[in-house]
Image (cartoon, grey):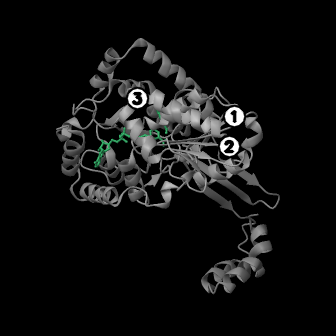
Amino acid sequence: MKIQSSKEFKLQREVEYGTPEQNKAVREIVAGIKQEGDAALLRYTERFDGAVLTPAQLRVTPEELEAAYGRVEESFVTAIRAAAVNIRAFHARQKRNSWMDLQPDGTVLGQIIRPLKRVGVYVPGGKAAYPSSVLMNVIPAQIAGVPEIVMVTPPSTGGSEGIDPYILVAAAEAGVHEIYRVGGAQAIAALAFGTESIVPVDKICGPGNIYVALAKREVYGAVDIDSIAGPSEIVVLADDTAEAAYIAADLLSQAEHDEMASAILVTPSQRLAEEVAAEVERQLLTLPRETIARASVENYGAIIVVESLNEGISVVNRLAPEHLEIVVNDPMALTGAIENAGAIFLGPYSSEPVGDYFAGPNHIIPTNGTARFSSPVDVDDFIKKSSLIYYSKEALLRDGAAIMELARREGLEGHARAIEIRLEKEAKGGDGNGEQ
Ligand SMILES: NC(=O)c1ccc[n+]([C@@H]2O[C@H](COP(=O)([O-])OP(=O)(O)OC[C@H]3O[C@@H](n4cnc5c(N)ncnc54)[C@H](O)[C@@H]3O)[C@@H](O)[C@H]2O)c1
Ligand SMILES: N[C@H](CO)Cc1c[nH]c[nH+]1
Ligand SMILES: [Zn+2]
Protein backbone atom coordinates (compact mmCIF):
# COMPACT_ATOMS: atom_id res chain seq x y z
CA MET A 1 0.00 0.00 0.00
CA LYS A 2 1.24 3.46 -0.84
CA ILE A 3 2.32 5.63 2.11
CA GLN A 4 1.52 9.30 1.56
CA SER A 5 0.94 12.54 3.44
CA SER A 6 -2.57 13.99 3.85
CA LYS A 7 -1.69 16.66 1.27
CA GLU A 8 -0.75 14.07 -1.35
CA PHE A 9 -3.93 12.03 -0.77
CA LYS A 10 -6.67 12.54 -3.39
CA LEU A 11 -10.19 11.62 -2.34
CA GLN A 12 -11.75 9.21 -4.88
CA ARG A 13 -15.29 10.57 -4.71
CA GLU A 14 -14.11 13.91 -6.02
CA VAL A 15 -14.33 12.10 -9.35
CA GLU A 16 -17.70 10.78 -10.58
CA TYR A 17 -19.18 7.86 -8.61
CA GLY A 18 -18.80 4.84 -10.89
CA THR A 19 -17.24 5.16 -14.33
CA PRO A 20 -19.25 6.80 -17.15
CA GLU A 21 -19.60 3.28 -18.67
CA GLN A 22 -21.05 1.86 -15.44
CA ASN A 23 -23.47 4.76 -15.12
CA LYS A 24 -24.58 4.34 -18.75
CA ALA A 25 -24.98 0.57 -18.38
CA VAL A 26 -27.16 0.98 -15.30
CA ARG A 27 -29.40 3.58 -16.97
CA GLU A 28 -29.91 1.21 -19.92
CA ILE A 29 -30.71 -1.77 -17.68
CA VAL A 30 -33.24 0.25 -15.67
CA ALA A 31 -34.90 1.53 -18.86
CA GLY A 32 -34.97 -2.02 -20.28
CA ILE A 33 -36.80 -3.41 -17.24
CA LYS A 34 -39.25 -0.50 -17.26
CA GLN A 35 -40.12 -1.12 -20.92
CA GLU A 36 -39.98 -4.90 -21.22
CA GLY A 37 -40.51 -6.32 -17.71
CA ASP A 38 -39.80 -10.03 -17.30
CA ALA A 39 -38.34 -10.41 -20.81
CA ALA A 40 -35.55 -7.93 -19.98
CA LEU A 41 -35.14 -9.35 -16.46
CA LEU A 42 -34.48 -12.84 -17.87
CA ARG A 43 -32.18 -11.50 -20.57
CA TYR A 44 -30.00 -9.53 -18.12
CA THR A 45 -29.95 -12.45 -15.68
CA GLU A 46 -28.54 -14.64 -18.43
CA ARG A 47 -26.08 -11.96 -19.54
CA PHE A 48 -24.71 -10.94 -16.13
CA ASP A 49 -25.25 -14.03 -13.99
CA GLY A 50 -25.13 -16.78 -16.63
CA ALA A 51 -28.44 -18.28 -15.47
CA VAL A 52 -31.05 -19.21 -18.07
CA LEU A 53 -34.47 -19.00 -16.38
CA THR A 54 -38.13 -19.05 -17.34
CA PRO A 55 -40.57 -16.63 -15.66
CA ALA A 56 -41.88 -19.54 -13.57
CA GLN A 57 -38.38 -20.15 -12.18
CA LEU A 58 -37.81 -16.61 -10.96
CA ARG A 59 -39.43 -17.21 -7.57
CA VAL A 60 -37.83 -19.57 -5.08
CA THR A 61 -40.20 -22.37 -4.05
CA PRO A 62 -40.95 -23.46 -0.46
CA GLU A 63 -39.39 -26.85 -1.32
CA GLU A 64 -36.10 -25.16 -2.27
CA LEU A 65 -36.08 -23.25 1.01
CA GLU A 66 -36.66 -26.45 2.95
CA ALA A 67 -34.02 -28.37 0.96
CA ALA A 68 -31.38 -25.69 1.67
CA TYR A 69 -31.17 -26.87 5.31
CA GLY A 70 -29.77 -30.16 4.05
CA ARG A 71 -26.90 -28.32 2.34
CA VAL A 72 -25.57 -26.27 5.29
CA GLU A 73 -23.71 -27.25 8.46
CA GLU A 74 -25.49 -27.33 11.81
CA SER A 75 -22.80 -24.95 13.14
CA PHE A 76 -23.93 -22.34 10.57
CA VAL A 77 -27.55 -22.57 11.73
CA THR A 78 -26.42 -22.17 15.36
CA ALA A 79 -24.25 -19.13 14.49
CA ILE A 80 -26.90 -17.37 12.39
CA ARG A 81 -29.48 -17.87 15.14
CA ALA A 82 -27.11 -16.37 17.73
CA ALA A 83 -26.39 -13.39 15.44
CA ALA A 84 -30.15 -12.91 14.89
CA VAL A 85 -30.74 -12.68 18.65
CA ASN A 86 -28.19 -9.82 18.94
CA ILE A 87 -29.45 -8.01 15.84
CA ARG A 88 -33.06 -8.28 17.02
CA ALA A 89 -32.18 -6.97 20.51
CA PHE A 90 -30.26 -3.98 19.11
CA HIS A 91 -32.99 -3.00 16.66
CA ALA A 92 -35.86 -3.55 19.12
CA ARG A 93 -34.59 -0.47 20.98
CA GLN A 94 -35.28 1.67 17.90
CA LYS A 95 -39.02 1.02 17.70
CA ARG A 96 -41.10 4.22 17.77
CA ASN A 97 -44.67 4.65 18.90
CA SER A 98 -47.35 6.98 17.61
CA TRP A 99 -47.93 9.88 19.98
CA MET A 100 -50.57 12.52 20.65
CA ASP A 101 -50.31 15.68 22.70
CA LEU A 102 -53.62 16.93 24.18
CA GLN A 103 -53.34 20.63 24.99
CA PRO A 104 -55.49 22.53 27.56
CA ASP A 105 -57.49 24.32 24.80
CA GLY A 106 -58.56 20.96 23.36
CA THR A 107 -56.06 20.94 20.50
CA VAL A 108 -54.56 17.55 19.73
CA LEU A 109 -51.28 17.30 17.83
CA GLY A 110 -49.36 14.13 17.12
CA GLN A 111 -47.67 11.70 14.81
CA ILE A 112 -49.07 8.42 13.58
CA ILE A 113 -46.32 5.90 12.88
CA ARG A 114 -47.08 3.15 10.39
CA PRO A 115 -44.90 0.49 8.80
CA LEU A 116 -44.32 0.62 5.05
CA LYS A 117 -46.57 -1.89 3.31
CA ARG A 118 -44.19 -3.60 0.90
CA VAL A 119 -40.40 -3.42 0.92
CA GLY A 120 -37.76 -5.01 -1.25
CA VAL A 121 -34.50 -6.14 0.30
CA TYR A 122 -31.37 -6.74 -1.76
CA VAL A 123 -28.99 -9.45 -0.61
CA PRO A 124 -25.69 -9.43 -2.51
CA GLY A 125 -24.49 -12.64 -4.07
CA GLY A 126 -22.02 -11.89 -6.85
CA LYS A 127 -18.43 -12.19 -5.68
CA ALA A 128 -19.49 -13.50 -2.26
CA ALA A 129 -22.82 -14.63 -0.80
CA TYR A 130 -24.12 -12.62 2.16
CA PRO A 131 -26.51 -14.53 4.44
CA SER A 132 -25.66 -11.98 7.15
CA SER A 133 -27.21 -9.25 4.95
CA VAL A 134 -30.51 -11.16 5.01
CA LEU A 135 -30.73 -10.62 8.77
CA MET A 136 -29.55 -7.01 8.59
CA ASN A 137 -32.26 -6.18 6.05
CA VAL A 138 -35.15 -8.25 7.32
CA ILE A 139 -35.00 -7.93 11.12
CA PRO A 140 -35.47 -4.14 11.29
CA ALA A 141 -38.30 -4.39 8.73
CA GLN A 142 -40.02 -7.01 10.86
CA ILE A 143 -39.61 -4.95 14.03
CA ALA A 144 -41.19 -2.01 12.20
CA GLY A 145 -44.13 -4.29 11.32
CA VAL A 146 -43.76 -4.40 7.51
CA PRO A 147 -46.28 -7.00 6.30
CA GLU A 148 -44.74 -7.74 2.88
CA ILE A 149 -40.98 -8.27 2.69
CA VAL A 150 -39.67 -9.42 -0.66
CA MET A 151 -36.07 -10.47 -1.13
CA VAL A 152 -33.94 -10.52 -4.27
CA THR A 153 -30.52 -12.08 -4.64
CA PRO A 154 -28.60 -13.14 -7.74
CA PRO A 155 -28.28 -16.76 -8.81
CA SER A 156 -25.08 -18.27 -7.40
CA THR A 157 -21.69 -17.48 -8.87
CA GLY A 158 -20.86 -19.99 -11.57
CA GLY A 159 -24.02 -19.65 -13.57
CA SER A 160 -26.23 -22.13 -11.69
CA GLU A 161 -29.87 -21.18 -11.40
CA GLY A 162 -29.62 -22.02 -7.69
CA ILE A 163 -29.16 -19.57 -4.86
CA ASP A 164 -26.48 -20.00 -2.25
CA PRO A 165 -28.05 -22.35 0.37
CA TYR A 166 -26.71 -20.25 3.27
CA ILE A 167 -28.70 -17.27 1.98
CA LEU A 168 -31.81 -19.43 1.72
CA VAL A 169 -31.41 -20.80 5.25
CA ALA A 170 -30.90 -17.26 6.59
CA ALA A 171 -34.10 -16.22 4.78
CA ALA A 172 -36.04 -19.16 6.20
CA GLU A 173 -34.68 -18.40 9.69
CA ALA A 174 -35.71 -14.76 9.32
CA GLY A 175 -39.15 -15.78 8.02
CA VAL A 176 -38.98 -14.42 4.45
CA HIS A 177 -41.00 -16.37 1.92
CA GLU A 178 -41.13 -14.21 -1.21
CA ILE A 179 -37.70 -14.55 -2.80
CA TYR A 180 -36.63 -13.95 -6.42
CA ARG A 181 -33.38 -15.15 -7.95
CA VAL A 182 -32.37 -11.90 -9.62
CA GLY A 183 -29.56 -9.51 -8.83
CA GLY A 184 -27.74 -6.37 -9.91
CA ALA A 185 -29.34 -3.27 -11.43
CA GLN A 186 -32.05 -5.39 -13.09
CA ALA A 187 -33.29 -6.63 -9.70
CA ILE A 188 -33.42 -3.09 -8.31
CA ALA A 189 -35.38 -1.88 -11.36
CA ALA A 190 -37.77 -4.85 -11.15
CA LEU A 191 -38.50 -4.06 -7.50
CA ALA A 192 -39.01 -0.38 -8.27
CA PHE A 193 -41.20 -0.63 -11.37
CA GLY A 194 -42.54 -4.19 -11.19
CA THR A 195 -42.62 -6.82 -13.91
CA GLU A 196 -45.14 -9.50 -14.80
CA SER A 197 -43.63 -11.67 -12.03
CA ILE A 198 -42.67 -9.13 -9.38
CA VAL A 199 -45.12 -6.73 -7.74
CA PRO A 200 -43.42 -3.35 -7.19
CA VAL A 201 -42.39 -2.24 -3.70
CA ASP A 202 -42.49 1.06 -1.81
CA LYS A 203 -38.86 1.04 -0.70
CA ILE A 204 -35.65 -0.82 -1.53
CA CYS A 205 -33.01 -1.49 1.12
CA GLY A 206 -29.76 -3.35 1.11
CA PRO A 207 -26.15 -3.25 0.07
CA GLY A 208 -24.58 -4.21 -3.23
CA ASN A 209 -21.83 -3.53 -5.70
CA ILE A 210 -21.48 -0.43 -7.85
CA TYR A 211 -24.25 -1.56 -10.25
CA VAL A 212 -26.68 -2.05 -7.38
CA ALA A 213 -25.72 1.27 -5.77
CA LEU A 214 -26.07 3.23 -9.03
CA ALA A 215 -29.41 1.53 -9.79
CA LYS A 216 -30.76 2.49 -6.37
CA ARG A 217 -29.75 6.09 -7.05
CA GLU A 218 -31.46 5.85 -10.47
CA VAL A 219 -34.83 4.56 -9.17
CA TYR A 220 -34.95 6.86 -6.13
CA GLY A 221 -38.09 8.95 -6.37
CA ALA A 222 -40.18 6.19 -7.90
CA VAL A 223 -39.47 4.35 -4.64
CA ASP A 224 -37.58 5.27 -1.52
CA ILE A 225 -34.15 3.79 -0.82
CA ASP A 226 -32.19 3.36 2.41
CA SER A 227 -28.89 4.93 1.32
CA ILE A 228 -26.11 4.36 -1.15
CA ALA A 229 -24.57 1.27 0.48
CA GLY A 230 -22.06 0.38 -2.20
CA PRO A 231 -18.61 -1.23 -2.15
CA SER A 232 -17.31 -1.59 1.42
CA GLU A 233 -14.97 0.87 3.10
CA ILE A 234 -12.81 0.93 6.19
CA VAL A 235 -10.72 3.69 7.67
CA VAL A 236 -8.49 2.91 10.65
CA LEU A 237 -7.26 5.80 12.78
CA ALA A 238 -4.37 4.43 14.81
CA ASP A 239 -1.46 5.61 16.90
CA ASP A 240 1.82 4.04 17.93
CA THR A 241 0.10 1.73 20.44
CA ALA A 242 -1.66 -0.23 17.67
CA GLU A 243 -0.62 -3.70 16.55
CA ALA A 244 0.34 -3.57 12.85
CA ALA A 245 -0.77 -7.16 12.15
CA TYR A 246 -4.28 -6.48 13.52
CA ILE A 247 -4.63 -3.29 11.51
CA ALA A 248 -3.50 -4.97 8.29
CA ALA A 249 -5.96 -7.83 8.84
CA ASP A 250 -8.83 -5.40 9.43
CA LEU A 251 -7.96 -3.41 6.28
CA LEU A 252 -7.93 -6.62 4.23
CA SER A 253 -11.24 -7.76 5.76
CA GLN A 254 -12.95 -5.02 3.78
CA ALA A 255 -10.63 -5.01 0.76
CA GLU A 256 -11.58 -8.63 0.05
CA HIS A 257 -15.22 -7.64 -0.61
CA ASP A 258 -14.69 -6.00 -3.96
CA GLU A 259 -12.04 -4.58 -6.30
CA MET A 260 -13.82 -1.26 -5.65
CA ALA A 261 -13.74 -1.59 -1.84
CA SER A 262 -11.58 0.93 -0.02
CA ALA A 263 -9.22 0.38 2.96
CA ILE A 264 -7.31 3.31 4.44
CA LEU A 265 -5.03 3.74 7.45
CA VAL A 266 -4.62 7.21 8.94
CA THR A 267 -1.82 7.51 11.49
CA PRO A 268 0.67 9.98 12.92
CA SER A 269 3.16 7.10 13.31
CA GLN A 270 5.62 6.60 10.43
CA ARG A 271 6.73 3.34 12.09
CA LEU A 272 3.17 1.96 12.16
CA ALA A 273 2.61 3.09 8.55
CA GLU A 274 5.65 1.13 7.37
CA GLU A 275 4.82 -1.96 9.44
CA VAL A 276 1.22 -2.04 8.23
CA ALA A 277 2.32 -1.67 4.59
CA ALA A 278 4.64 -4.68 5.02
CA GLU A 279 2.00 -6.68 6.91
CA VAL A 280 -0.62 -6.09 4.22
CA GLU A 281 1.79 -7.51 1.63
CA ARG A 282 2.60 -10.50 3.86
CA GLN A 283 -1.04 -11.29 4.69
CA LEU A 284 -2.20 -10.83 1.08
CA LEU A 285 -0.02 -13.75 -0.02
CA THR A 286 -2.16 -16.28 1.87
CA LEU A 287 -5.56 -14.64 1.49
CA PRO A 288 -7.89 -16.81 -0.65
CA ARG A 289 -9.36 -13.67 -2.23
CA GLU A 290 -5.94 -12.15 -2.86
CA THR A 291 -6.74 -10.95 -6.38
CA ILE A 292 -9.80 -8.94 -5.33
CA ALA A 293 -8.15 -7.57 -2.17
CA ARG A 294 -4.96 -6.63 -4.01
CA ALA A 295 -6.90 -4.73 -6.67
CA SER A 296 -8.82 -2.94 -3.91
CA VAL A 297 -5.74 -1.83 -1.94
CA GLU A 298 -3.85 -0.85 -5.07
CA ASN A 299 -6.67 1.25 -6.55
CA TYR A 300 -8.58 2.52 -3.53
CA GLY A 301 -6.28 1.82 -0.56
CA ALA A 302 -3.93 4.27 1.16
CA ILE A 303 -1.80 4.80 4.22
CA ILE A 304 -1.95 8.46 5.15
CA VAL A 305 0.64 9.81 7.56
CA VAL A 306 -0.65 12.86 9.43
CA GLU A 307 1.07 15.37 11.73
CA SER A 308 -1.14 14.57 14.73
CA LEU A 309 -4.26 12.64 15.79
CA ASN A 310 -6.16 15.94 15.50
CA GLU A 311 -5.21 16.19 11.84
CA GLY A 312 -6.18 12.50 11.55
CA ILE A 313 -9.66 13.31 12.82
CA SER A 314 -10.04 16.02 10.14
CA VAL A 315 -9.03 13.53 7.45
CA VAL A 316 -11.54 10.99 8.79
CA ASN A 317 -14.34 13.57 8.83
CA ARG A 318 -13.53 14.45 5.22
CA LEU A 319 -13.53 10.78 4.19
CA ALA A 320 -16.83 10.11 6.04
CA PRO A 321 -16.17 6.36 5.90
CA GLU A 322 -18.65 3.52 6.17
CA HIS A 323 -16.56 1.92 8.96
CA LEU A 324 -14.09 3.68 11.23
CA GLU A 325 -11.83 1.86 13.66
CA ILE A 326 -10.16 4.00 16.32
CA VAL A 327 -7.17 2.10 17.65
CA VAL A 328 -5.36 4.57 19.89
CA ASN A 329 -4.37 4.78 23.53
CA ASP A 330 -7.72 6.28 24.63
CA PRO A 331 -10.26 5.75 21.82
CA MET A 332 -13.26 7.02 23.81
CA ALA A 333 -11.57 10.41 24.16
CA LEU A 334 -11.53 10.89 20.36
CA THR A 335 -15.02 9.63 19.61
CA GLY A 336 -16.82 12.92 20.27
CA ALA A 337 -14.77 14.64 17.56
CA ILE A 338 -15.87 12.17 14.85
CA GLU A 339 -18.62 13.88 12.86
CA ASN A 340 -18.88 11.62 9.83
CA ALA A 341 -18.69 7.82 10.06
CA GLY A 342 -21.34 5.14 9.55
CA ALA A 343 -20.10 2.84 12.31
CA ILE A 344 -17.34 3.48 14.83
CA PHE A 345 -15.35 0.59 16.31
CA LEU A 346 -13.32 1.38 19.41
CA GLY A 347 -10.16 -0.30 20.63
CA PRO A 348 -8.06 -3.25 19.50
CA TYR A 349 -10.67 -5.95 20.04
CA SER A 350 -13.57 -4.32 18.16
CA SER A 351 -12.38 -5.68 14.85
CA GLU A 352 -14.70 -4.65 11.99
CA PRO A 353 -16.06 -8.19 11.32
CA VAL A 354 -17.50 -8.16 14.87
CA GLY A 355 -19.96 -5.59 13.52
CA ASP A 356 -20.37 -7.26 10.12
CA TYR A 357 -21.79 -10.38 11.68
CA PHE A 358 -22.58 -10.37 15.31
CA ALA A 359 -22.60 -7.42 17.71
CA GLY A 360 -26.11 -6.27 16.74
CA PRO A 361 -25.81 -2.89 14.95
CA ASN A 362 -26.66 -2.99 11.27
CA HIS A 363 -23.95 -3.67 8.69
CA ILE A 364 -25.84 -1.94 5.86
CA ILE A 365 -24.10 1.39 6.11
CA PRO A 366 -23.75 4.39 3.77
CA THR A 367 -20.61 4.51 1.63
CA ASN A 368 -18.85 6.92 -0.72
CA GLY A 369 -18.97 9.82 1.72
CA THR A 370 -22.75 9.64 2.18
CA ALA A 371 -22.28 9.07 5.93
CA ARG A 372 -22.16 12.89 5.93
CA PHE A 373 -25.95 12.85 5.66
CA SER A 374 -27.26 9.30 5.98
CA SER A 375 -27.22 6.53 8.55
CA PRO A 376 -27.03 2.75 8.80
CA VAL A 377 -30.24 0.85 8.08
CA ASP A 378 -32.51 0.76 11.11
CA VAL A 379 -36.18 0.43 12.08
CA ASP A 380 -36.84 4.03 10.98
CA ASP A 381 -36.11 2.99 7.39
CA PHE A 382 -39.25 0.88 7.41
CA ILE A 383 -41.78 3.31 8.87
CA LYS A 384 -43.51 6.45 7.73
CA LYS A 385 -45.19 9.15 9.76
CA SER A 386 -48.44 11.05 9.33
CA SER A 387 -48.97 14.27 11.23
CA LEU A 388 -52.21 14.57 13.19
CA ILE A 389 -53.88 17.96 13.73
CA TYR A 390 -57.13 18.50 15.64
CA TYR A 391 -57.78 22.21 16.28
CA SER A 392 -60.51 23.15 18.72
CA LYS A 393 -62.82 26.12 18.15
CA GLU A 394 -61.09 27.95 20.99
CA ALA A 395 -57.68 27.41 19.40
CA LEU A 396 -58.85 28.62 15.96
CA LEU A 397 -60.38 31.76 17.46
CA ARG A 398 -57.08 32.43 19.23
CA ASP A 399 -54.76 31.75 16.27
CA GLY A 400 -56.96 32.68 13.29
CA ALA A 401 -55.70 36.25 12.89
CA ALA A 402 -52.06 35.15 12.85
CA ILE A 403 -52.80 32.45 10.27
CA MET A 404 -54.61 34.95 8.01
CA GLU A 405 -51.74 37.42 8.38
CA LEU A 406 -49.22 34.82 7.20
CA ALA A 407 -51.47 33.70 4.32
CA ARG A 408 -52.00 37.24 3.05
CA ARG A 409 -48.26 37.99 3.24
CA GLU A 410 -47.79 35.02 0.91
CA GLY A 411 -50.46 36.45 -1.41
CA LEU A 412 -52.73 33.44 -0.79
CA GLU A 413 -56.12 34.99 -0.17
CA GLY A 414 -57.90 31.64 -0.51
CA HIS A 415 -56.01 30.36 2.49
CA ALA A 416 -56.91 33.42 4.54
CA ARG A 417 -60.58 33.14 3.62
CA ALA A 418 -60.77 29.48 4.67
CA ILE A 419 -59.99 30.72 8.18
CA GLU A 420 -61.96 33.93 7.94
CA ILE A 421 -65.22 32.22 7.00
CA ARG A 422 -65.11 30.33 10.30
CA LEU A 423 -64.14 33.35 12.40
CA GLU A 424 -66.97 35.39 10.86
CA LYS A 425 -69.52 32.69 11.57
CA GLU A 426 -68.34 32.46 15.17
CA ALA A 427 -68.53 36.26 15.50
CA LYS A 428 -72.20 36.04 14.41
CA GLY A 429 -73.01 33.48 17.09
CA GLY A 430 -71.47 30.22 15.79
CA ASP A 431 -73.12 27.04 14.59
CA GLY A 432 -74.55 26.27 17.97
CA ASN A 433 -72.99 22.83 18.37
CA GLY A 434 -70.85 24.11 21.24
CA GLU A 435 -67.80 22.10 20.16
CA GLN A 436 -64.57 23.10 21.88
N1 LIG B 1 -22.13 -0.86 2.31
C1 LIG B 1 -22.64 -1.92 2.85
O1 LIG B 1 -23.41 -1.83 3.80
C2 LIG B 1 -22.31 -3.28 2.30
C3 LIG B 1 -22.68 -4.46 3.00
C4 LIG B 1 -22.39 -5.70 2.43
C5 LIG B 1 -21.78 -5.77 1.19
N2 LIG B 1 -21.44 -4.60 0.56
C6 LIG B 1 -20.86 -4.59 -0.76
O2 LIG B 1 -21.77 -5.31 -1.58
C7 LIG B 1 -21.07 -5.70 -2.74
C8 LIG B 1 -21.42 -7.11 -3.13
O3 LIG B 1 -21.01 -7.22 -4.46
P1 LIG B 1 -21.11 -8.55 -5.27
O4 LIG B 1 -20.59 -8.23 -6.64
O5 LIG B 1 -20.49 -9.62 -4.50
O6 LIG B 1 -22.67 -8.88 -5.35
P2 LIG B 1 -23.94 -8.04 -5.85
O7 LIG B 1 -25.09 -8.95 -5.67
O8 LIG B 1 -23.99 -6.71 -5.25
O9 LIG B 1 -23.68 -7.83 -7.41
C9 LIG B 1 -23.78 -8.89 -8.31
C10 LIG B 1 -24.58 -8.44 -9.52
O10 LIG B 1 -23.89 -7.37 -10.18
C11 LIG B 1 -24.28 -7.38 -11.54
N3 LIG B 1 -23.12 -7.14 -12.40
C12 LIG B 1 -21.89 -7.68 -12.26
N4 LIG B 1 -21.09 -7.26 -13.28
C13 LIG B 1 -21.86 -6.46 -14.06
C14 LIG B 1 -21.61 -5.73 -15.26
N5 LIG B 1 -20.41 -5.72 -15.84
N6 LIG B 1 -22.62 -5.02 -15.80
C15 LIG B 1 -23.84 -4.99 -15.20
N7 LIG B 1 -24.12 -5.67 -14.07
C16 LIG B 1 -23.15 -6.39 -13.51
C17 LIG B 1 -24.85 -8.74 -11.84
O11 LIG B 1 -26.18 -8.59 -12.21
C18 LIG B 1 -24.78 -9.51 -10.54
O12 LIG B 1 -25.98 -10.18 -10.28
C19 LIG B 1 -19.58 -5.51 -2.46
O13 LIG B 1 -19.17 -4.34 -3.12
C20 LIG B 1 -19.54 -5.30 -0.96
O14 LIG B 1 -18.46 -4.49 -0.58
C21 LIG B 1 -21.71 -3.39 1.08
N1 LIG C 1 -18.52 -5.30 5.55
C1 LIG C 1 -19.80 -5.36 4.87
C2 LIG C 1 -20.39 -3.96 4.88
O1 LIG C 1 -19.62 -3.11 4.16
C3 LIG C 1 -20.78 -6.29 5.50
C4 LIG C 1 -20.41 -7.74 5.47
C5 LIG C 1 -21.23 -8.81 5.35
N2 LIG C 1 -20.47 -9.90 5.40
C6 LIG C 1 -19.23 -9.53 5.59
N3 LIG C 1 -19.18 -8.22 5.62
ZN1 LIG D 1 -17.39 -7.09 5.60
Task: Name the residue beneath numbered marker 1.
Answer: 240
Question: 150 above or below 340?
Answer: above
For marks 3 and 1, give the CA distance: 43 Å
Please report contact status of discs 1 and 2: CB closer than 8 Å, yes or no. yes
Q: Residue at x 43, y 42 (%)?
A: 296
Q: Earlier in the sequence, mark 2 or mark 3?
A: 3
Task: Name the residue beneath numbered marker 2.
Answer: 268
Residue 265 in which image quadrant:
top right
Q: Earlier in the sequence, mark 1 or mark 2?
A: 1
For marks 1 and 2, give the CA distance: 8 Å
Query: How dense is the environment of label 2, judged by Cα within 10 Å: few (below 14), some, or many (20 and up)?
Result: many
- Residues 33 and 350: in front is 350
Task: Name the residue beneath numbered marker 3.
Answer: 171
Which dot, 3 or 1, sits closer to the camera? Answer: 1
- Residues 357 and 78: in front is 357
Residue 91 in which image quadrant:
top right
Query: How dense is the environment of label 3, judged by Cα within 10 Å: few (below 14), some, or many (20 and up)?
Result: many
